[in-house]
Every structure is written in C-alpha cells, then in structure tokens.
Image (tube, helix red, strand yellow):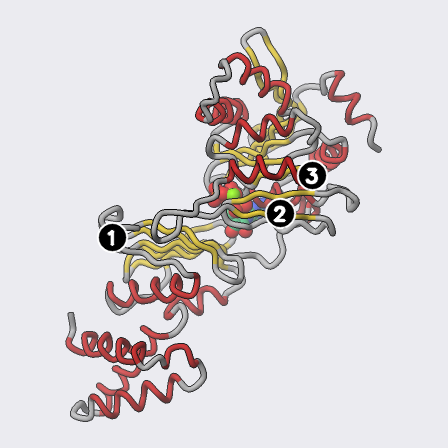
Amino acid sequence: MHPLHHLADRLRERLIQSAALGEGGDLHARIRELVEHEAALLDAPARERLVELVVERSFGLGPLEPLLRDPAVDEVMVNGPGAVWVERRGRIEPTDVRFEDPAALRHAIERILAPLGRRVDEAQPLVDARLPDGSRVNVIIAPLALDGPVLTIRRFRRRGFTPDELVELGTWTAPLRDVMRRAVQARLNILVSGGTGSGKTTTLNALSSFIGADERVVTIEDAAELRLQQPHVVRLEARPAGVEGRGEVSIRRLVRNALRMRPDRIVVGECRGPEALDMLAAMGSGHDGSLSTVHAGSAEEALRRIETLALMADVGLPHAAIREQLAAAIDLVVHQARLRDGTRRVIALSEVVRVASGPATRELYALRDGRPVWRAALTDELAQRLGRVA
Ligand SMILES: Nc1ncnc2c1ncn2[C@@H]1O[C@H](COP(=O)(O)OP(=O)(O)OP(=O)(O)O)[C@@H](O)[C@H]1O
Ligand SMILES: [Mg+2]
C-alpha cells in the first residue's frame, strides 16, 4: 500500500478513537488539523492529498456520493475499487468513479453498514441491508467474493411508478392496465413473475394502487421496498439473524402472523422460500386479492417454482394436495422481462387453470415481436369475476 494511504488509514483510526466521526460538521477542520499536526514533515501538496484521503475514508459514501445524487441512476454496482458501474434508464454503463484502493472501498462499505448496526467480516461475508432512505444494499466479500469486496446499491425511488406511468413507459399497455385494475378490484390473487431486476416489485407496487382505500393490507418483505398509497397499511419486514446468529424472524413467520391481524389482503414482496405454502393457504382462505412476486423465466415456471418452494415447507402435506392448493389459490400470473434494449415489459398475462395433470397456465395476452396480442378469451369463471367490477 502507498505510504500516504497507510497514513490516511491511521489518521482515520485516530479520528474514530477521538470520537470525532460522530460529530459531523467540524470534521473537515478536525481532519485538516490532524494532518497539519501529524504530517508536518510532508510538503503542502502531499498534505492536501492526505486530507482528501482521510475525508474519503471518513465521510458517507465517498466517491459514490455523486452517483447516488443523480436521479437517473437506479443502481450502483461496485465490483472493485476501479470498477464502478451504474444503471441509467435500463442500461448498464461503466463510470469513471474510482476508489483509491481496496481499503478505501472497504472503509466506504463499513461506513455504510456501521450506522445500520450491521457489519461484514470473514464470519459474515454477505450482508443485505437497507439505507435510511430506503435504498437496498448488498455487500459480499472474501472468501465468497473472489476479487475483493462487491457492493450493490439499488437506489430507492421516492415514489414508485403509477400504472399510467408504466403504460407511458411501455411496460404495460392501456388494455392490460384496465384488465389488471379489474383483476385487483375483483380480488383475484395475482403473482408477478420475471427475472432479476425485471421490474416485478415495481409492477406489484403499481398493482397495489388499485386496492381500495377501505381495505386493510398487510405487506411482508425481506427489505421494505413497497410504497402502498392506501391509508390502512401495516408494513412488516423480516429480520435477519443478528451478529451472534440469533433473533431471526423469517418471512414465513410473518405470513403466519399476518393471518392473525385480520388483513383483507396480504402482499408478500417476494416469494422465495417455504413461505410459499403459507401464502397459498392465505390466498385460498379468505384473503383473496393477495399479491406477490416470484423469480421465474415464464408464467409456467412461476407456478412450478411456487410448487417447489411450498414443498420445501415440508409439513407432510402430500404433493398432490399442494398442487391442488396452488391451482385453487393463484388466479393470474403477470410475467415481465427486461428486454435487450433495456426496457422492461409485461410480456405475458396468463390465467391459472386446472388440467388433468394439475395446475397450468393459459396465456391470455402476450407480446409477439414487440406487438401486444390477445391470444385467448377469459375463461367463463374469470370473466364472471371480472364482470362484477366496472
Ligand atoms: N417499468 C420500468 N421502467 C423503467 N425502469 C423500471 C421499470 N420497472 C422497474 N424499473 C427500475 O428497475 C429496477 C428494478 O426494478 P424492480 O426492483 O421493480 O425489479 P425486480 O424484478 O423486483 O428486481 P429483483 O429481482 O431485484 O427483486 C429499479 O431500479 C426500478 O426503478
Ligand atoms: Mg423485487
């Protein structure tokens, strides 16, 4: 390591020990003072440089700060001190932002996690956390990350997209919006599926805006991202195990607890574990109109995935019973994708039907060569349920 960097690390340690880091405002002056005092032998440019290095190591997000202030940036991806990428308007681009060295990146990560009461080290090399502004942070370090610390920040949008904005963006089409509005109002259980970052949570959030203001909604998430606009919403967030590995509260526990909270609807941010079983049970037992997302490559695969996840709950239910529950619980699957040009689109809307072999999807609407096509009429049952709302 460059001797100046080494010195900067030591000075930062000194600052921490003198508890000056918590004091905010005068920290700049304090750092300058410290540098003048401890590095009087260095020439003026070197001292300036040292001040910069200590500041970078002591303040907020360091060189990431300008990226996170840019409202066009949705995601910041740091693969190493010299490899910082962002996503802007659906496209991933490199930036010229650099950290001085791996230590500076590591310090920035520590500064992000420390105020959240989290830390990353060899025993806990993988951390998922949420910043006070709602942005989602993931950190993974050695030995799991092979080339140094990796930091990923999903910026929080102060406001999700409304259904009309999604139509404007081309993610939904107007006819699709109208069917989905009626589907939510008719209390169909809807699953949004898609790949990583395909916009599932965003679509779920927009769907939730169709829920009536008089309904009691309980939302359950790993890291709270949803922003429901209704007045009567209870938000629950799962808790990871603490530093000593205790105190975990799973999504599954929260789903079961939610059932005792007299919800009209339950919204599970993402189904990715055995909570799938409890969610199916909730959907099939008077909490119609529940919504969730699942990671899958197609609507059909989404059903298979929920089935597999529900089986993981391992409560001794026969497989056939779980498939039966699945067919009864989920009414619609909205499948979304991020296309090659960076846009995110709903590429299929499917109804869940029962066939001899169990639950299956029946495509109602799809994008074919970029054009929306209605492929099948609603089944009578669904048409009847939708018909009851205007
Ligand atoms: N329709 C859209 N048009 C443009 N940008 C979008 C759209 N939907 C989502 N985004 C942006 O894409 C990013 C990912 O969106 P979102 O979190 O909804 O995806 P996801 O599929 O839920 O991701 P994950 O797999 O991480 O749960 C966010 O930064 C969001 O602001
Ligand atoms: Mg999501």
Q: CA distance from mark 1 to mark 2?
A: 43 Å
SS at mark 3 in the image: loop
User: Disc 2, ligand 1: is the CB inside 8 Å?
Assistant: yes
Residue 330, horizontal then vertical, whole percent: 62, 25
| Front residue (pair 333, 238) | 238
The residue located at (72%, 39%) in the rendering is: 174
Q: Amino acid at mark 2?
A: Leu
Q: Amino acid at mark 1?
A: Glu
- Is tag 3's residue or tag 1's residue first in the polypeptide sequence? 1
SS at mark 2 in the image: helix
| Front residue (pair 256, 389) | 256
The residue located at (16%, 73%) in the rendering is: 2
| Residue matched to label 3 | 263
Q: Give the vertical position of 30 relative to 381 (above or below).
A: below
Disc 2 packing (10 Å; few <14; some 14–19; many ≥20):
some
Q: CA distance from mark 3 to mark 1?
A: 41 Å
Residue 175, horizontal then vertical, whole percent: 72, 34
Q: Amino acid at mark 3?
A: Pro
- Is tag 1's residue or tag 2's residue first in the polypeptide sequence? 1
Q: Give the vertical position of 261 relative to 123 (above or below).
A: above
Task: Residue 122: give its label.
Answer: 1
Residue 49 horizontal side relative to residue 177, left or right? left
Q: Select label 3 or label 1 by which is in front.
A: 3
